[in-house]
Image (cartoon, rainbow, N blue to C red):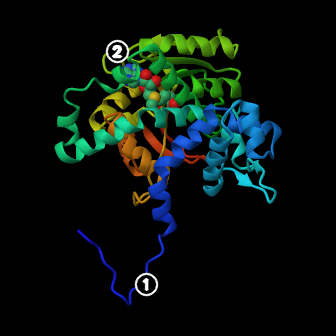
Amino acid sequence: MTRQMADNQTAPVLPIALERSIYGLITTPVLHLALEHGIFDRLLADGPLPSSSVAERIGADADTVERLLLVLAAFEVVRRDADGSFHVPVEIAPFVARDSASYVGGFVNHMVMDAPGRLERLAEYLTRGKEAADAARPAPYDEFYRDEQSTQDFMDAMWDLSYGVSQELAALAGLDGHRRLVDVGGANGPFAVAALRQSPELRAVVFDLAQVGPHLERTRVEHGLADRLSFVAGDFFHDDLPAGDLIAMGYVMSNWPDRECLELLRKAHAACVPGGRLLIMERLFDDGRDGPIATAVMNLEMQVETRGRHRTPAEYVELLTSAGFVDPEVRRSTRDKHLVIGCKPSG
Ligand SMILES: C[S@@+](CC[C@H](N)C(=O)[O-])C[C@H]1O[C@@H](n2cnc3c(N)ncnc32)[C@H](O)[C@@H]1O
């Protein structure tokens, strides 16, 4: 088809929203390369720097480093000074500094490494539907934990995704008076560690699939929590959950359809001592489901990576009250993971 413009028609300017959508496919891998190859490390430690100095310090090709930095500058992830040097803006720094609790590198790696396969899958879903297309595929966690490297990458992604915000969530939850936290699907312990740091009287159990055990063990040792943090291996669809007065589920509900979520919440209710509380920690859709962007994008990701979806606060409240929890409450963090709390009546 040939497209023509009438003589009197002026060419429309590409709106910035569309420009970012088109070129976003390139910027995420560029961000990944800059994180992996130490470009941000050098700029944070020694910047502002011209691209040639960054290239020299990381032992990389200067022309390629310059082009990568120009993309990041165009997308305002780094800034280019009048003399052509680059620096990392203060608001970006905590997210790209490797030793920061808010580091996004593990999560970006998780997004980038499987993205091409995921895009192919979406095309198949569009034509055949998810259920038919997934029929011959392994279950989501068999795929994530298919080998040691993939398990390690997933654990790194969970830590990077959750540890920074967990400190805020633990404070928002209010841990005073609680003695035993059971973090269901707690992975390598980002929320458990944040909670234990905040509440000296608390003990925590991470309940998760057996493959996660060695990763939680590493966290216990690295954080000096061997006497307060333990691991129970199990499958939450087949085994009972350990008992506790605080049952947490972070990014667990968003992996599963409503029917399985209700089953898990009923198990959580059985495991929760009377007077105890449930903490659902999730991204939330706005009530009208028209944002935020990260929730809408991750809702699509959930379709490909898992069998779940993201929900509005009202949908979570409905699920937890159906499972028997009362006095539901939503507490929002300043980031993209929030709390939906339910209580188990004491008598
Ligand atoms: C998306 S991760 C969330 C990790 C962590 N709670 C967080 O907020 O970052 C979901 C967790 O659920 C665990 N999980 C998945 N299926 C499970 C099952 N059948 N039984 C127990 N844990 C399971 C996974 O191993 C993983 O650690």
Identified by mark 2, the residue type is: Asp
In which of the image's four quarters is ligand 1 placed? top left
Residue 42 seen anywhere in this rendered image of the structure: yes
Q: Residue at x 70, y 33 (%)?
A: 100
Question: Distance of mark 2 from mark 1, alpha carbons?
Answer: 66 Å
| Secondary structure of the residue carrying numbered label 2 | loop
Local crowd at mark 2 within 10 Å, few (<14), some, or many (≥20)?
few
Q: Which residue is mark 1?
A: 10
Identified by mark 1, the residue type is: Thr
Image position, residue 327 (x, y; %): 47, 43
Which quarter of the image is occupied by the N terminus? bottom left
Residues 332 and 210: in front is: 210
Residues 156 and 34: in front is: 34
Q: Which residue is mark 2?
A: 239
Q: Is 104 left or right of 318, judged from the image as shown? A: right
Residues 180 and 335: in front is: 335
Residue 323 seen anywhere in this rendered image of the structure: no
- On whether ligand 1 comes within 8 Å of the CB at mark 2, the answer is yes
| Secondary structure of the residue carrying numbered label 1 | loop
